[in-house]
Structures are given as C-alpha cells and as structure tokens.
Image: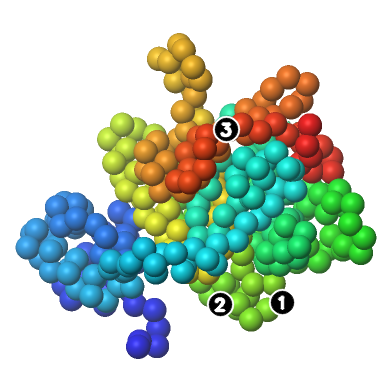
Amino acid sequence: MAERPLEIEDLPGVGPSTAEKLREAGYLTIESVATTSAAELAEITEISEATAKKIIKAAREKADIDGFKTGKDIFEQRKDVRKISFRVPELDTLMGGGLETQAITEMYGEFGSGKSQIVHQMAVNVQLPEDDGGLNGSVIYIDTENTFRPERIEQMVNGLGMKGLDAQEFLKNIHIARAHTSDHQMLLVENSRELVNDLKNSEKPFKLFIIDSLTAHFRAEYAGRGTLATRQQKLNRHMHDLFKLVDEHNAVALVTNQVMSNPAVFFGDPTKPIGGNIVGHTATFRIYLRKSKGGKRIARLVDSPNLPEGEAPFMVEEAGLKPC
Ligand SMILES: Nc1ncnc2c1ncn2[C@@H]1O[C@H](COP(=O)(O)OP(=O)(O)OP(=O)(O)O)[C@@H](O)[C@H]1O
Ligand SMILES: [Mg+2]
C-alpha cells in the first residue's frame, strides 16, 4: 500500500499538463478517472482515445472501485444503515425513520422554503444519542452562501427541551468551511478525509456531511449554454466523491439545491431543481420543499429507491423544526 493517497499524476501517461487539464475538468481523483469514458477523457485532455483507454485501465486497477457484489454483500452492508431522526414524526414517517446513512439526500425548493433550517436542525440532531434519534456523531458543513448561523444552532439545541444540553458543545462538533468557488467546494470534499480520520477515534465520529448549497456556485460560474456539459461533469464528480465518503463511513450526506423557475411549464409546479438529471440521479433521496398556508411547510418525497412518494407538513419555529 502506498503511504500517501494516490494522485492522478501517479497514472502512467498522465504528465503535469494532462493532470492540469483533468483537474480543470473536474477529474480530481483516480476514482473519477476510472469511472469516465475514453471518448470524454480524450476530448478533455486532447490525447488519443487509445492513450485515454490505457489511462482509464490503469486507473481502474489502482482505484478502489467495486466490482460485482452479491445481493448478500449488499444486504450485509445495508445492515449498518442508520437514520438521523428529524424529531418531527410526520417527517420521519415520510423518510422511513429519518435521513439514511450511506446515501445522499437532496432537498430542493425556492428561497425561504426551509432548506437551511433543516440542515441546521440535522446538524443538531445527529449529535444526539441513538435513543434520541441521533448518531452520536459530528458534522462537516460546507457553507457556500454564508447562511450558517451559530445562534440558530443554539436556539435549536435549547428547543429540544432536553435537560443538560450545552449548545457550545454542539457548536464544537460542527466543522464549517466556506466554499468560495465550485472548485474550492469540490476540493473541500476531497480534502475532508483528513478531518474524517481525525474524528474517527473521537467521541463524536463524523456522521453528517452538509453542503448548503450544492449548486449555487456551479450555477453562477457556468451560466452560458456552452458550459453546461462541463458543469454537469463536475457536479457528477462532486456527487460521486461525496457519496464515496459517506458510503465508506456510514454517514449521511444532506445537500440543498435551489429551483429555477421554468416559465414554459404552465401546469403543475413551474420549478425545477438546478443540476437536473445529474444531481437527481446521484442523490438517493430527493425532497421537494414548499411553503404553504399559515407558515406551514410541506416536504414532498419525490424520489426514493425504497419508499413511497408522499408529503409531510412541518413548522419552522424559533425552537427549530416542529410538527404542525
Ligand atoms: N428564528 C426563527 N424562528 C422562526 N422561523 C425562522 C427563524 N429563522 C428562520 N426562520 C424561518 O425560516 C425561513 C428561512 O428558511 P431557510 O433559510 O431555510 O430558507 P432556504 O430554503 O434555505 O432559502 P434559500 O434558498 O434562500 O437559501 C425564514 O423565512 C423564516 O420563516
Ligand atoms: Mg438557505
């Protein structure tokens, strides 16, 4: 085993200039190269498809890519799946008990629909003991819009109504990084392994990865039509890296996404999440949030591998998420 993690330069045929082109296109890890196509790689790096094939083959040999597993293997791995409770019975029922580990949950909705409120609440709940719906774990939180508020965490901890909780202790277990660009955001996920390893043997191992918002930088930076393919490729890598991290550590990924209004849709809901199919296909669960009458909010489960579609109402109060 190598002492340091392998870099894309460790692949035969990848010199500094090819490596740079790969990184620019969002291929930051050996795994990401291993899972791409030769045609795509050749186009990005301006190498021949034959060379690209060799690079991908080498990456597949070096990368930690799973081959076939039996249903039994997956059954065994899924035995470890745990849930973080929302501590709002309707939301827990909707999600089959809460937010699942080894999965990415995407929440999308318009401004003020409650996305950031929910991520704050889950950053609190995950720290609780399992008996109280938590995973006794800590949080890595990528804040892209400067909307993390320690005061909200404090209010939510106090709002749990449990004796002996110290909000300052909760704040210590939330590791926040501001991401300034989409590339920075991607790097933060890649580099979080070090922090995850440090936390591994602590009292509160890493159990929740939050990105609020997943798509804001991508949307701002890749605005023109011609840049859409690159944006989707990068988002794909990003989601793949995130999934790998939470899959390996039996943790939860919770990401938020804005909606863009689509005036071409006159019936139904005229909004669509950013990142479209890429985000949608890589996220395991998708929740659509909307505001309703009387301050009520509705969460709708729109995509899940094993749960029925459905809706759950909830309130956002000073004390946090509460039943209606
Ligand atoms: N202390 C509080 N007490 C009660 N309600 C609050 C409190 N703080 C925030 N809220 C509610 O949460 C709403 C903001 O929701 P949130 O920040 O989660 O929106 P969002 O979906 O993240 O929006 P954006 O897309 O702009 O990021 C406020 O409009 C308010 O209704
Ligand atoms: Mg927000």
User: If you read the primary sequence from the N terminus, does the residue marked by circle 2 or circle 1 appear first?
Assistant: 2
Confirm or deny contact between disc 3 and disc 1 (CB under 8 A). no
Pointer 2: residues within 10 angstroms few (<14), some, or many (20+)?
few
The three-letter amino acid code for the residue at tag 1 is: Glu
User: Which mark lies nearer to you, 3 or 2?
Assistant: 3
Confirm or deny contact between disc 2 and disc 1 (CB under 8 A). no
Q: Residue at x 92, y 60 (%)?
A: 163
Pointer 3: residues within 10 angstroms few (<14), some, or many (20+)?
some
Q: Residue at x 38, y 44 (%)?
A: 281
Question: What is the secondary structure assignment of the residue under circle 1?
Answer: loop
- Residue 226 falls in which quadrant of the image? top left
- In the rendered structure, the answer to whether residue 88 lies left or right of residue 191 reads right
Provide residue 65's location: percent of width, then percent of height.
31, 69
Residue 193 to residue 255: above or below:
below
Asked if residue 85 can be seen in this view, the reply is yes
User: Which mark lies nearer to you, 2 or 1?
Assistant: 1
What's the distance in space between the residues labelled 2 and 1, CA to CA?
A: 13 Å
Scheme of colours in the image: rainbow
- Residue 238 falls in which quadrant of the image? bottom left
For the C terminus, the image quarter is: top right
Q: Which mark is residue 197?
A: 2
Provide the residue designation for mark 1.
203
Q: Residue at x 51, y 30 (%)?
A: 259
Q: Which mark is residue 310?
A: 3
